[in-house]
Image (tube, coloured by chain):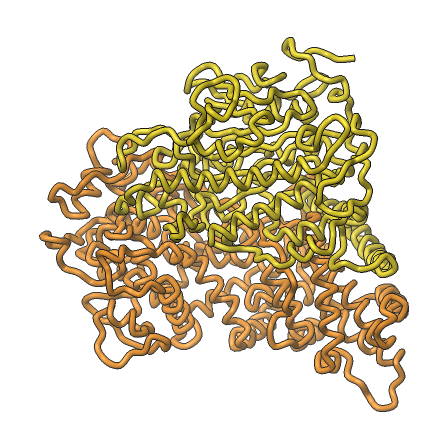
Chain colours: A orange, B yellow
Amino acid sequence: MVALACGGEDSGPLPSDGQGSGGSAMGTGGGAPDEQPIAQAGRVRRLRKSEWTRSVRDLFFAESPFELSSPLPDDPKTEGYIFDGQAEQLNVDPTLWAAYQRSAQEVARQVTERPELIEGIAPYKAGQDASERAKEFLVSWLPRAFRRPISRAELEKYARLFETGSVSYPEVPPFEGGLRLVIEAALQSPHFLYRIEVSTEVEEDGLIPLDGFERATRLSYLLWGTTPDETLLAAADAGKLDDEEGVRAEAERMLDDPRAQESIQFFFERALDTERYLRISPSPTFYPDVSKDLPTIALEETRHFTFDIVFQAGGGVYDLLTSRRTFANASLAKIYGLSGDFAEDRFKLVELEPGERSGFLTQVGFLASHATSVNPDPIHRGVFVGKQLSCLDIQAPPANVPPLPDPEGKSNRELVAAHTEAPDTICRECHAELINPFGFPFESYDAVGAYRTMDGPHEVDTKAAPLIDGVPTPVSDAIEFAERLAGSRDVHRCMVGRIIEFAQGRKLLPEDKELASQIGEASLSEGLSFRELFVKIATSRAFLYRAPLASKESP
Amino acid sequence: MNRTFFGKRVPRRLFLRGVGGVTLALPILEGLRPRRADAQAETTPSYAIFFRQADGVASAQVAQELGQEPERFWPREPGALDAANVEGRALDELTEFLPKLLVVGNANMEDFNFGDGHARGALQLLTGWGPHVAGAGGDSEAGGESLDHRIARELNRDGIESLYLYAGGRGGWLGGPCISHRGRNSRRTAEPSPLVAYQTMVGLSGSPDSETIAMIRARNKSVNDLVREELQDLLAMSDLSQGDRQRLDLHLSSIRDLEVNAGCRTTAEIEAELADTKTSSTDGDVVQKLARLHMDVAALAVACGYTRSVAIQVGDGNDGQTRYWVDGSLLENYHFISHRRLSHDASGAIIEGSDLLHHKIDRQFGQSFKHLLSRLSAYEFEDGTLLDKGLSCWMNDLGNGPGHSPSNCPVVIAGSAGGVLKNGEYVVLEGGRRARTHVRVLNTIATAVGCRTGDQDYCDDVGDTRFEDRSPLPELFA
């Protein structure tokens, strides 16, 4: 067991079992599901920018998002939260309100100028007069916009607004005018802009079960990143989401729907930090044959790879880290040393060399985005494995760290080790036993991710003893390392913790760690697929209930 | 009647509290073109516009990459600013405005442990605060409120926030926009589109005639009334968290803000120019053009009394996306140039001549700052221009590029805030590099535009409470 002093505050879903693996601890798992604590949370959660965009698209059955003269502002970033917009930070300030107002007006205009969209939300029936048609529209569309049934008072309020549409928009026919004004208003309504949980009835166990519509909304934004469809709302209305089995059935259905792909892909892009691919910038002097489009090519590969794992192969954490199936175009085939016909504009399913590749960590995107323009970067490769995959707390280096000195005949590994592991330095504390051993196994891949056995005149040395589940574990190379990580309790818990963070819209809290432990254990021991992990979290008590506030002043 | 502050005479009107409701007598501007404002110059409130550059400047330094680099930014001598004093330096881009400038040297930030020099600089720049969580590097957040927000909170009418504008690529280091903060770990969203910023200010889009405007306003009002009622109903729910209440309250006040902002419009031609602009780019020319359009909106905003505080940020946390054009060539991204290397860290190949390239990029920032000063000067009063009424401040997160120094971070102030600050001088702050002067510069600016701490006649509470001295700097006052 190794005790480390370089861990910072617990800021992520650290899934260690408290045995000193570099940061703070979480429970060991074992509490019955109905005894797991639930963290308090707000009841009014604003839609993220991407959720707003998709919801508006789907409310009108449009094939693609509406084109706006100016996009909504980006959601604010929150320290330590890897997904967009932590719920507590999502507010409506004057800038965003102006954008909502403008966007609602533009969408309403576009909808009422496209007969096929009007027909989708307010189909004309022969013999029906305008007021009957208006009422049917309000009764059918407003519950979809607000993701719940509407009250009589609400119906009357919006009906009155509909009637004033002809005055507000004298240049269009009265029905279109009413439609336009109601759409404008509904898209600015807090009942659309926020996910509001109104349930307050506390059960004997002290928790508040969310009603079917609230559960439908949580499910839909987790699995689809958009508003519930009519089937899901109907299931809620029929009481089918009142029990876990009903929720499970709907979650399974939703994961089969293409809409799940957008949301799950977004999860992986953030969990695997593919934004970093934009930094890929190999030196044209050292890598003259590498495409300048490598950042986007690598991103495309990761998207294909994770889609294949989740939706085609039914894989889980183990497969993410060990699968040799991936997708390559001509540029990638060259880097991977593949022969055969490859086109630049088409990605083909390939099986990579077993002795050279094993899962995401041996793919071009990860390797090239954690490299300098010339050399592999074992430090940042190591930090990624430690922080992002194992959820260990690794502090950033102190400011003004001097650059690596000239190699003077050393290999890349020797140079990094000499620079960061010198005795009696502050660097050694984190690098010698934590960061570097996570990164050195990848020395067999150069700065663009090509496999290599030599580093200049030196044979590459990939042996290391990285900390896995709190124990230094000797591995001979990246292949063995990936296999060990795939069997790591910490890694499985960490990935599950990420999904919980994604689902709850916030960083992991102490109350979540029991759940992360339990599902993480199941992921490891039963080889659960990512689909099953998402379903398990979607059917957990933490997802289907909420805790009443302990006091009006918290959280 | 004047009162004294540190022995300096400061106009009485700056001590009036609650002057936010007093606005410039320009209820509806015809455009941004030069014009004379009529009376009431005496009541024109002061303002601050911040213009942020990342990655340090090409100042004299010894860097591992290129060895001794000559001075290319700072004036030659402290004291009066004249053409000879800035000749050959980036500041000579502002020669026309030298009598209006106060160049502040030796503004030193604290070397807080952000785990990253850019995070330390960008997040401390306007806040004066250390990190929310130490050592978080690219995940860092600020430990407190930024000055632009503070000024708006204290001096703007009806709680309107400062205008926060962004020019650059999307995302990037520190998530892109990162200098404006409501408070600890509460970063603000920036507006990347000058058109949207303008439309937000006036509450309208396009160039409708007055009859249409009336109809739009009536329509918006009916929707706003309905939304307001729904928000009030939600606020009446029991068991709402404090965060939920604050969220709904902010939403309500945002609706009100937009309603009261109308009436400060520009010409259709300028609206068209605002509309014909990208909202994000990594092309340096486009980024600087965006920054200048933001400045047009900023000038209009302070002229109309919409806000007394604007923050314009160019580039993300380390401006690692913008690629500038110099002498007809498209450079590597600015962060690489500032590092003097082909990498975001210290490992890439050395870029020969990058110190000179950095200087030429500094000049482009100087040219954009000059654009802002020209715009502000176009609003004339009997006793000066809008430029004189407030202050505009070109600031940098770092003292230099390769060293990421927290010391001697450039602060170039234009305008005297109505005669409060010195103009036409280069002042090097006392105390050497150990003196934590940057936070005192922030309090000087706050004081100059009218912020106060409690019953004091000055402001000394901006920035991290761990600083021993946050008082304003007497040597910067007129």
Q: Residue at x 22, y 50 (%)?
A: A440
Front position in the image: A250 or A121? A121
Image quarter hosting the C terminus of chain A: top right
Q: Position of residue B269 (x, y in %)?
A: 70, 55
Residue, far top = B7
Q: Residue drawn 18% across and 40% down?
A: A406
- The residue furthest left is A457
Residue farthest front in this picture: B84
Q: In front here: B325 or A33?
A: B325
- Give the answer, above or below, for where A319 lies relative to A457: below
Please give left or right for residue A366 compared with residue A150 in the image: left
Residue lying at the far bottom of the rendered structure: A126
Residue placed at 18% from the left, 42% from the top? A415
Q: Position of residue A519 (x, y in %)?
A: 45, 60
Give whichever of B388, B281 is nearer the camera.
B388
Tell me residue B252's x, y (percent).
77, 48
Most foreground residue, A456 or B16: B16
Q: Position of residue B2 (x, y in %)?
A: 75, 13
**A76 over A482 or under it: above or below:** above
Q: Within the image, what quadrant is residue A22 found in?
A: top left
Where residue A410 sits, quadrant-wise, is top left
Residue at position x 36%, y 67% from top?
A297
Q: Is residue B239 visible?
A: no
Q: Name the quarter where the N terminus of chain A is drawn.
A: top left
Left or right, B356 with respect to A121, comes to left
A543 over B202 or under it: above or below: below
Q: Judge whether residue A173 can be spotted in this image.
A: yes
Please give the count of numbered marks on the rendered protein. Answer: 0
